[in-house]
Image (cartoon, rainbow, N blue to C red):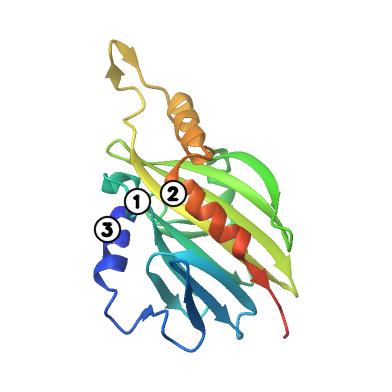
Amino acid sequence: MIIRLVFALVLGACSLRVVHCQSKSIAQRDGYCRVQDAALGIAFAGAGAVEKADSATYRIALGSSENSPAYAALAQVSATNRVFVDLPGSYGGRLHLDTPSASRLIHDRIFVDSVNTGRQKFRREYWTVYGGMGMWEGVINCYTQEGGRYYVVSLVQDRPLGKPGEEVDGMPLTAQDLKGKFLTSLRDTTNVVVKEFTALLMSVQIHDER
């Protein structure tokens, strides 16, 4: 689940796969790592450990200062030819939105709007997916198209909200209520994780020079 991935990012800070702020493409300023990737045509600033997960994906641990690890989360910045939503805990990885699997899970996309960063306009989707054993996966998935490819900036977080049908204080939990509770948290602008993710999204600059 996402908490284990966050711990892996923190514990792996000395490994070769973690991008250090001392490298040529990254500068440290005000506690943020500023990443510039000419190959992907993208630049952004993020707090916390920044990992180059693959040739087209960066991952950033968010909310590590929170008292409870249950509130930690992973942000991801990717360049891709096919738009996707990353659901590592519930689906097992990337769900490409142009596949039959996406049509079966589309009911888990519970709110859609857009956000203008001043540089780009992103479509923003909120996903809440039940992963089993009372664990829910919430995602803020933002993407825009530039130069024939998509740029995806996302936040993934796991929360132990309970099982649908389970009784709490004599009342059964419903999937709709649990989804709504998670959505409220993901849209809470005072939430530390949401604030860090919003700052990351607002910092994204795309310069597609292919």
Q: Which residue, given by chain and number where applicable, does mark 2 sit on?
A: 193
**Residue at 70%, 48% in the rendered image:** 114
Q: Quadrant of the C terminus?
A: bottom right
Does residue 163 appear left or right of residue 46 in this picture? left
Which of pointers 1 and 3 lies earlier in the amino acid sequence?
3
Check disc 1 and give the amino acid type.
Ala
Whether 208 is drawn above or below 32: the answer is below
Whether 3 is drawn above or below 109: the answer is below
Q: Quadrant of the N terminus?
A: bottom left
Q: Which residue, given by chain and number where applicable, does mark 1 sit on?
A: 72
Whether 175 is drawn above or below 7: the answer is above
Q: Are marks 2 and 1 in contact (CB under 8 Å)?
A: yes
Check disc 3 and give the amino acid type.
Arg
The image quarter in which residue 147 lies: bottom right
Q: Are marks 3 and 2 in contact (CB under 8 Å)?
A: no
The image quarter in which residue 42 lies: bottom right
Does residue 200 appear left or right of residue 177 in this picture? right
Farthest front residue in view? 30
Does residue 208 appear left or right of residue 47 in this picture? right
Does residue 181 appear left or right of residue 170 in this picture? right
Measuring from the top left, give residue 161's x and y in whole percent: 34, 33
The label nearer to you, 1 versus 3, is 1
Check disc 2 and give the amino acid type.
Val
Which of pointers 2 and 1 lies earlier in the amino acid sequence?
1
- Other-residue count near label 3 (Cα within 10 Å), few / some / many at <14 / 14–19 / ≥20: few
Q: Which residue, given by chain and number where applicable, does mark 3 sit on?
A: 4
